[in-house]
Amino acid sequence: MQTAKAQEVVAERDFSFGFEPTGDILTEPVRLTERARSVPARTKLVSSDRASHILESILPSHIIFYRVPVNDPAHDPSPSELAAQQRRGASPAAAALAAASAPAKPPVFEAKKIFGSVTTADMAESIKALIGSDEESARVVIGAEDISILGDEVEGSGIEGDRLKALGDFQVEVRVKGGEPVLRTVSVRSQDANPASP
């Protein structure tokens, strides 16, 4: 070995060592076409109408996600604001006068925000877990692109594109390609309301 090293002989591994030659020795590597390299999947999918029927029958009316709510300091008055409010309303008559003179504000609904979000991808994973228990329903192909959130993207609604960013109940439409839409409610609830949480 030392003499081979001194003569600068390169040692390579012989992958055919210990195997008997079969007579057909290839001198050139076989080149496969792209079509020959790919193996077609042999999974038989269900029809779009059958997939819609499976989703309609298996999915519960409410799909529940638990998230941690954000404590928004904009909604909680500071101690100095509380003291100012108490000084302004020193007597019941003054408080009534201040309430009457203040312009009426329409009630603005603003959903309680959450840390993170619930995306259509989260919903698709939850639906896959729900329908994966049966052999036929496991063949239903569903992804984030098959789920759309119904409702307007207005300030404070909790809907931002394909994400839910607030606590509440939201309507979603699950549509398998070529099938009928299935409407369900996605409920985003506070983490402390989760019975399984410690």
Image: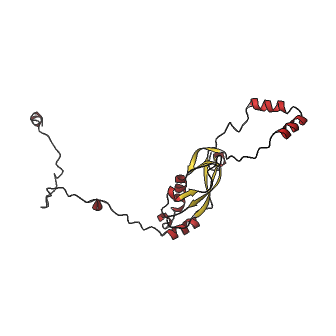
Foreground pick, 13 / 127:
127
Q: Quadrant of the N terminus?
A: top left
| Residue farthest right in this picture | 93
Whether residue 177 sits left or right of residue 187 in the image: it is left
Residue 116 rendering spot, x and y as whole percentages: 57, 44
Residue 43 rendering spot, x and y as whole percentages: 41, 66
Residue 159 rendering spot, x and y as whole percentages: 61, 50
Q: How many marks?
A: 0
Which residue corresponds to the image point at 48% horizontal and 62% vertical from the top-left? 141
Residue 60 rendering spot, x and y as whole percentages: 61, 62
Which residue corresponds to the image point at 33% horizontal and 62% vertical from the top-left? 39
Residue 17 drawn above or below residue 139: above
Foreground pick, 132 / 195:
132
Foreground pick, 60 / 108:
108
What colour scheme has been applied to the protein in the rendered image? secondary structure
Foreground pick, 50 / 137:
50
Whether residue 56 sits left or right of residue 5 in the image: it is right
Which residue corresponds to the image point at 29% horizontal and 62% vertical from the top-left? 35
Q: Quadrant of the C terminus?
A: top right
Whether residue 179 sits left or right of residue 169 in the image: it is left
Task: State the image quarter where residue 95 is shown.
Answer: top right
